[in-house]
Image (cartoon, coloured by chain):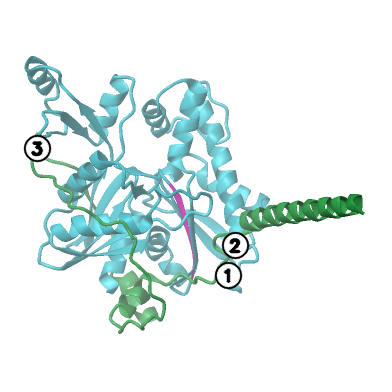
Chain colours: A green, B cyan
Amino acid sequence: MLNNNIILLFILISLNIIFITVGYILGKINKFSHNSTDNQYKPQSFISKQKNNNDTKTQSSIIDIDDTKVVVAIKTDGIEKKYSVLGNTQTSNEDISQSVNKLKNMKG
Amino acid sequence: MSKGLDVGTSYIVLSKENNGNIEYKDFRDAFYIIKPTTPVATAMIEKGLAGKVFIKDSDGSFILLGQDAIEKAIERNDNAKRPMYRGVVSAKEKDAKRILAFILKEVVGTASEPGEKLVFCVPGQPIDQEDDDFDIGYHEDVIKTVLGECGYDARPINEAEALAYSELSEDDYTGVAISCGAGMTNVCVMLNGEPTVVFSTTKSGDWIDRMAAVATGETDSVVQAEKESGQFVIGKPNENPILSAVSSYYERLIDYTTKNLSVALANHPLLPKFKDSLNVVIAGGTSLAKGYPETFHIKLKQNGFPLPIKQVKHSSDPLHSVSKGCLIASKVL
């Protein structure tokens, strides 16, 4: 009887370990096969984003803390320039007004 | 008046309209620090740097900028540093942020009027790496802060979306735009002016430099200089061992990029059903190598690209087209 209980216990513990291991492996496979573009996020065009910035923000029921990195002041004073010109300037004979008007008409 | 700004890992390019034309100002995004050890050394170093583009910092060190930084690094068998890595500024690199801020302010100058609109590009989220240091939001905030100090109302745009605005006008803003930069390759599939799929990969020009440098025992800066000489064709053998390595790694990079592109788009739930075949437009410094668009086209077909391709076009101005796209976006605001 005692032997049966020990065997049963051994089987239960082994099954537990097997299921946890299988679950872990399946989780890893699922993570690696998950394509990071294959999500519900549809990219918003630059122009739509600018228009939507003027809309009133909808209230979220989820309370979240803002843990984005803070941009501390980047001081560039104390730097002494030792050159006269920085960068190469060139002019291109291109007129973008047609492209701009086309895009404006498409976006409404 | 408004401006466009390509904040690239290798080049920073400002664009603005000037009497109906576009005026570009570009600068190499690199720096090299020389710390003199004695006052005599300080005087000698400063004399030796005459004619170069450099600055003197408050701690007495000399910082060469741009192409001069790369040339000095090569001279010393060293690597020039970059303010950005893989398309974004690192929160951990204090020196890098400061130099980037300085270069940006010098390139963009002060706004012609307070609140002048300036659109700058940012990379898309990469699909091939997870790195806590890669923080697009932080990168955006740093650039906005720096440009804000110059009086601009700065807005970010995805790099490949900007390229699409620049190059897909004749295609009614429908097609695929691929920006092959130094740090990253950015992709945008656009339909009638709306980006539908946007992503990036973290292997691009710098990866080629790094791998070829390891293969040949040279520094990254030396490899980069040889690569930019353009004396090679992708996939063709070359007597120069550095260029031979570069040519091989280019093939691997294009294979990797087209595979990722094909996998990312195949069965994508947001991918539109295009009725006509599409133009794929390529730009960026990494795409300047001879044979790039042709090899890209071949690899797209080999790797099962899921969209019908009309043509793989190379931008007529691969180094400036992203900046031009930012300028167009700034005009539409």
Query: Is A77 located above or below residue B191 in the figure?
Result: above
- Give the overall secondary structure of the magenta segment: strand
Dot 3: chain letter: A
Kind of residue at badge 2: Leu
Question: Tag 2's secondary structure?
Answer: helix
User: What residue would you read off at disc 1?
Assistant: B271
Gap between marks 3 and 1, in whole Å? 50 Å
The answer to whether any part of residue A96 appears in the image is: no
Say if mark 2 contacts mark 1, CB within 8 Å: yes
Spot occupied by residue B94 in the image (x, y as percentages of width and height): 25, 42
Dot 2: chain letter: B
User: What residue would you read off at disc 3?
Assistant: A81
* Residue B187 among those drawn in magenta: yes
The answer to whether any part of residue A72 appears in the image is: yes
Dot 1: chain letter: B
Residue at horizontal 38 percent and vertical 50 percent from the top: B318
Residue at horizontal 92 percent and vertical 54 percent from the top: A1
Q: Quadrant of the C terminus of chain A?
A: bottom left
Give the crowd class for mark 1: few <14, some 14-19, many >=20 residues within 10 Å: some
Spot occupied by residue A14 in the image (x, y as percentages of width and height): 79, 51
**Disc nearer the start of the sequence (2/1):** 2
User: What residue would you read off at disc 2?
Assistant: B265
Is A97 placed left or right of A36 in the picture? Answer: left
Residue in the foreground of this view, choosing between B47 and B91: B91
Gap between marks 2 and 1, in whole Å? 7 Å
